[in-house]
Image: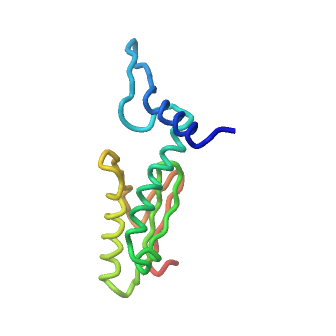
Amino acid sequence: MFSLQNLKNIIVFDLHNCFFSAGDVLLRQKKGVPMGSPLSPVLAILICAYYEHKWLESKPPPVRDRVAGIRYVDDTHNVVVVNGCDVSSEQEAHGLLNEMNSCYHRDMEVQVEKIENNMYHFLETTVVCRPGGV
């Protein structure tokens, strides 16, 4: 059995000793989660979840209760409940989603999928949005 300190040491070692080749050149990755490391998916989930949790905890319960999401490694599908009869509710939802997309560390970049014809893609799925939730 190993301690949390041992786990931390393994992660720090992995972050500071990630090398890869490009042609004949050996490169050391200095920033970000190590490419190709078995720890990378776990680190990506932990880092993203940390910032999302921090953001969500900063919101009062009525707002927090309207936000939900699904995560798969570094992909996320976020949903905000709106009152379809209230235009300001929809505007507030867009504001919350934009805020959530900017809650991450300044070196992290969020790529937002475009919604076209009430459809958007998440992983290998196409989600269709219909008025009234039908």
Instruction: Measuring from the top left, give residue 42's x and y in whole percent.
Output: 54, 44
Residue positioned most to the right: 1
Q: Is residue 87 left or right of residue 127?
A: left
Image quadrant where residue 18 sits: top left
Q: Residue at horizontal 44%, vertical 23%?
A: 19
Q: In the image, residue 126 lies at what x, y percent?
A: 50, 58
Quarter residue 95 falls in: bottom left
Against 125, residue 28 (above or below) is: above
Q: Is residue 62 above or below residue 22?
A: below
**How many circles with numbers are drawn on the protein?**
0
The colour scheme of the drawn protein is rainbow
In terms of depth relative to the viewer, which is nearer, 8 or 69?
A: 8
In this rendered view, identify the residue nearer to me: 78 or 26.
26
Q: Is the N terminus in the top left, top right, bottom left or bottom right quadrant?
A: top right
The answer to whether residue 98 is left or right of residue 51 is left
Identity of the residue drawn at 39% across and 23% down: 28
Image spot of residue 67 (x, y percent)? 45, 71
Who is closer to the viewer here, 22 or 107? 107
* The residue positioned farthest toward the bottom in the image shown: 85
| Residue 35 position within the rendered picture, expressed as x and y whole percent measured from the top left | 46, 32
Question: Residue at left 36%, top 54%?
Answer: 104
